Image (cartoon, helix red, strand yellow):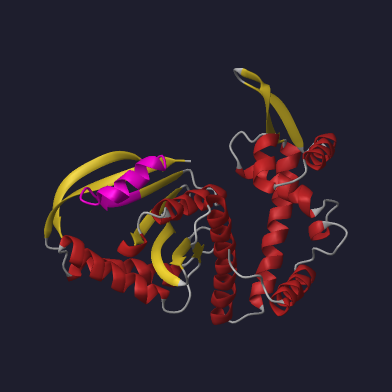
Amino acid sequence: MPPAPTADAVARVRRFNRSYTRRIGLLEQGLLHSPFSLAEVRVLYEIAHRTDPTASALLAELGLDRGYLSRILQRLRKSGLVSATTAPGDRRRRLLALTPRGRRTFGALEARSSREVGLLLGRLTPSGRRRFTGAMATIESLLAGADEGARTGRDWSLRGPAPGDFGWVVQRHGELYAAEFDWNEEFEGLVAGIVARFVEHFDPERERCWIAEVDGMRAGSVFLVRESDTVARLRLLLVEPWARGHGLGHALVDACVRFAGKAGYRTITLWTQSVLRAAGRIYQEAGFRLVREGRHRSFGADLVEQVWEKTL
């Protein structure tokens, strides 16, 4: 168990919460100058962005009290924004969907939200915006990693990237793959290009990098990047040799899968080599399927490339 947080750390978080909730308008009677509460707008968002959502799925995602969610859905249905229909082949399941009026209402709320966030970010310089969105990604990754560690009972965590992490990712890929597979500098150059493009074109809404830590030491990495509006690509999965066997690889891949689903992707794809057998087992256990193989020569070695995919 990590040590208890200090009183100063608790006070800093509470101060940030007070400042940020005021800035984005959460203290107003209706969110985004609408008649809807924050919880109601979030329910509309989940219904709009999920395939055949159910009340049970919303409960699992949002962690709301069952009675509270039921009252929200009842109000949204009475307002003509949400419909519920029986699932084909399973009369016990009720599928939720936005009505035409609900889509118009939610579309207006989405546009207003994007406009207000744009105004908030518009006050910052380009460098400030990158620091701001990067800090938010770090917070999200740290909390997700803490949840994963608590769920598995293992003494490690996942977090977002910090200064020096991107250089470490390139260095350790080059060193480890040279030591374990005798790959040459072409591979390190490939990794450096992937990392450089991620930093230059980072989209915090649809992309992530996670760094795994064990006892405060870097122990692994993975990236999820946008391939298209519906397809995400998993890249640069790495776990240090001394940290293997603790579930870090599975946790890093699971973090990608969860984020990709929330970001609205329909498929995750990845490119790897058959010689990376441990990684292949992780992908298979996470629900990926091997869709293509082919021989090639890269990184100074004769290899069999593999493309894996997972439908979300």
Residue 303 rendering spot, x and y as whole percentages: 15, 52
Horizontal side, residue 22 vs residue 283: left or right: right
Vertical side of 59 occupied by 242: above or below: below
In the image shown, does 1 or 6 lie closer to the viewer? 1
Quadrant, the N terminus: bottom right
In the image shown, does 87 or 152 lie closer to the viewer? 152
Q: Residue at x 66, y 45 (%)?
A: 46
Image quadrant assignment for residue 289: top left
Vertical side of 132 occupied by 142: above or below: above
Horizontal side, residue 254 vs residue 79: left or right: left
Any part of residue 240 in sight: no
In the image shown, does 44 or 143 lie closer to the viewer? 143
Residue 118 rendering spot, x and y as whole percentages: 65, 69
Which residue of the protein is positioned furthest toward the right in this rendering?
Answer: 29
Q: Residue at x 54, y 63 (%)?
A: 141
Residue 305 rendering spot, x and y as whole percentages: 21, 49
Which stretch did the figure color magenta? 270-288
Q: Residue 268 magenta-drawn?
A: no
Q: Residue 274 magenta-drawn?
A: yes
